[in-house]
Structures are given as C-alpha cells and as structure tokens.
Image (cartoon, rainbow, N blue to C red):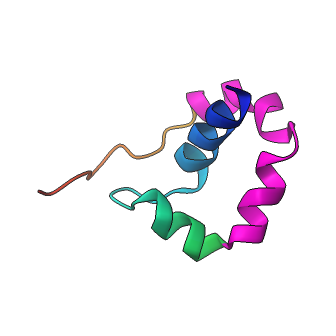
Amino acid sequence: MSVVEKTILLFREQGKTGERFADTIERIGFENVEAQLLTDDILSRKQEILDAELHLVGGATC
C-alpha cells in the first residue's frame, strides 16, 4: 500500500494538469520515478504535497 500512496503523491506533485500518469513517467524518466518510489522521501513530504496549490485549473477535456 505504501507504493500506491507514494505513486499518487508523486503524480500529484510532478504530474501536469490533464497529463496521464504514463506521460508523466515518460517525461521525468522511469529510473527517476523508480528511485523516488523505492525511498520514503516523498512520504516525509506528504502533507506539504497535499497542501500545495496544484492542478487548480484544467483537467480532463473528454
């Protein structure tokens, strides 16, 4: 479950509005994503990521 939580936090923080997760991985690099998911650094920043004002405009257009 922690990998799922880290993945969601990573996507919230580093994904662009309207971007699919696979596109985020391609843009920032699989090795980068893998390295972030194998550590707990992103969990230590969980509240900061959740409180950040991200993705306030846009979203799915279909």
Looking at this view, name the residue that lies furthest to the front. 1
Q: Is residue 35 above or below residue 5?
A: below
What residue is shown at x 47% (from left), y 57% (from top)?
21
Residue 12 rendering spot, x and y as whole percentages:
53, 44
Quadrant of residue 4 in the image? top right
Quadrant location of the N terminus in the rendered image = top right
> In the rendered structure, does residue 18 fall within the stretch colored magenta?
no
Image height check: is 16 above or below 28? above
The residue segment tinted magenta is 29-50
Q: Main secondary structure of the magenta part?
A: helix
* Number of marks: 0
Left or right of residue 47: residue 43: right
User: Image quadrant of residue 41?
Assistant: top right
Q: Position of residue 48 (x, y in %)?
A: 69, 31
Q: Quadrant of the C terminus?
A: bottom left
User: Residue at horizontal 26%, vertical 51%?
Assistant: 59
Of 3 and 47, nearer the camera is 3
Looking at the image, residue 60 sits to the left or right of residue 38; the answer is left
Residue at 83 percent across and 30 percent down: it is 44
